[in-house]
Image (cartoon, helix red, strand yellow):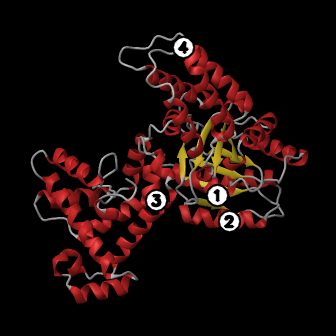
Amino acid sequence: MFENLQDRLSGALRSISGKAKITEDNIKGTLREVRMALLEADVALPVVKAFTNQVKERAVGSEVLKSLSPGQAFLKIVHQELQSVMGEANEGLDLAAKPPAIILMAGLQGAGKTTTAAKLALYLKEREKKKVMVVSADVYRPAAIKQLETLAKEVDALFFPSDISQKPVDIAKAAIAEAKIQFADVLIVDTAGRLAIDEAMMAEIQQLHKAIDPVETLFVVDAMTGQDAANTAKAFNEALPLTGVVLSKADGDARGGAALSVRHITGKPLKFVGMGEKIDALEPFHPDRMASRILDMGDVLSLIEEAERKIDKSKAEKLAKKIKKGQGFDLEDFRDQLIQMKSMGGLMGMVDKLPGMGNVGQAAGQMDVAEKQLRQTEAVINSMTPLERHFPDKINGSRKKRIAAGSGTNIQEINRVLKQHKQMQKMMKKMSGKGGMRKMMGAMKGMGGAGGPGGMPGGGMPPGMGGGGFPFK
């Protein structure tokens, strides 16, 4: 998401760096570039006009602090205004109502409502520790009811069965009664979508809304429809008292126009973004973090939160104790690191959130090579016996042939993995000694090359890829 905009804005903002102060003349070209970048990202024209006018008003004549260069000062203003356009801060769900708190999902057909309902159920269950029930009031698409039932099992949420012969209002009321009996904290009501906005659909959902009085009415919209997403949300907002918007399929939108337009056009907060097909790929929308990602300043907070959720803490502690005792870092540990990184979205998912890595993320071919090497490394280690994983020095020529055959690779690939492991082992050894972290950073710097990322053990991008560093130096 935002890859194209990120690239254009980086170039536009570079043009002001090195100036002595910010003047109307020297930011004219930069603002023109920013305007074009936003329009190409499919941001709605009224949003682009309001944004650039506000940036210009704040930048021209503004006092540049001694600690900042004019380029940095201008970047700070653009960052703050991007935040302002998308909403000042994350607005969570209001679930303070008497249980069950009812969430109504609305949207067009194909926007991803049913999948988003299940993702939201998992989010509330895992992060908010809520007992969640889901129900489908889509009586026009029998497959929607079955789909929600399947997804509810996957996320371990309560499912209330419904039938196409019933009326949506009757389904919802029966589900509310059952949610009370089951002591559910939250009831998520999925509704029918249409291919276009029509009066019958609006009348039906208005009637449903009136009957169940939800605490949250979320509009789910496909991010890839660009500024049309914001316009559709506005039309729904005129018919329903929306409390927020969820952008689905945001990972497939390289432009990001919808995210930047929704708040300004609808006046409603963007509460969540769907960042992939996986059932846990739903993130709360943080305007400040998203602004940082757009400007290639990274989103380290989200990366840390994801690591805290997905990294196996007991395994991490066990590994730390093992290394401290000087017991070494074997191939079993190495494989665990790869699995943990995979759970965080792989290399691409991590690089996307690191500061200054926008251009790396865009080198899709190089990233594909790196991801392929990670998969091969895991396959190679899986083809080893437990003895070989614990004592790699015992892997001789005949063992290498057997491992290569079992992993569908070759002897060179086995040697690469063993070399990679040795480098990781050295880094871990440095980390366990006195002044370990400083020594380890020095080792990483040497391995990553000037300006290139090295390894990140412990949660960790393995070093040595592509002959001593990542292939995208």
Q: CA distance from mark 2 to mark 3?
A: 34 Å
> Which residue is located at x 42 percent, y 41 percent?
356
Q: CA distance from mark 1 to mark 2?
A: 8 Å
Residue under label 1, please give it.
115
Q: Nearer the viewer, mark 2 or mark 4?
A: 4
Residue under label 3, please give it.
367
- Which quadrant of the view contains residue 265? top right
Residue 43: horizontal and vertical position, in percent?
A: 69, 36
Characterize the local packing of mark 2: few (<14), some (14-19) or many (20 or more) Cα atoms within 10 angstroms: some
Characterize the local packing of mark 4: few (<14), some (14-19) or many (20 or more) Cα atoms within 10 angstroms: some
Q: Nearer the viewer, mark 4 or mark 3?
A: 4
Residue 424: horizontal and vertical position, in percent?
A: 23, 61
Residue type beneath disc 2:
Gln
Position of residue 426 in the picture relative to residue 312 (left or right): left
Position of residue 222 in the picture relative to residue 157 (left or right): right
Q: Is residue 6 above or below residue 444?
A: above
Q: Secondary structure at mark 3?
A: helix
Of mark 4 and mark 3, the one earlier in the sequence is: 4
Q: Nearer the viewer, mark 2 or mark 3?
A: 3
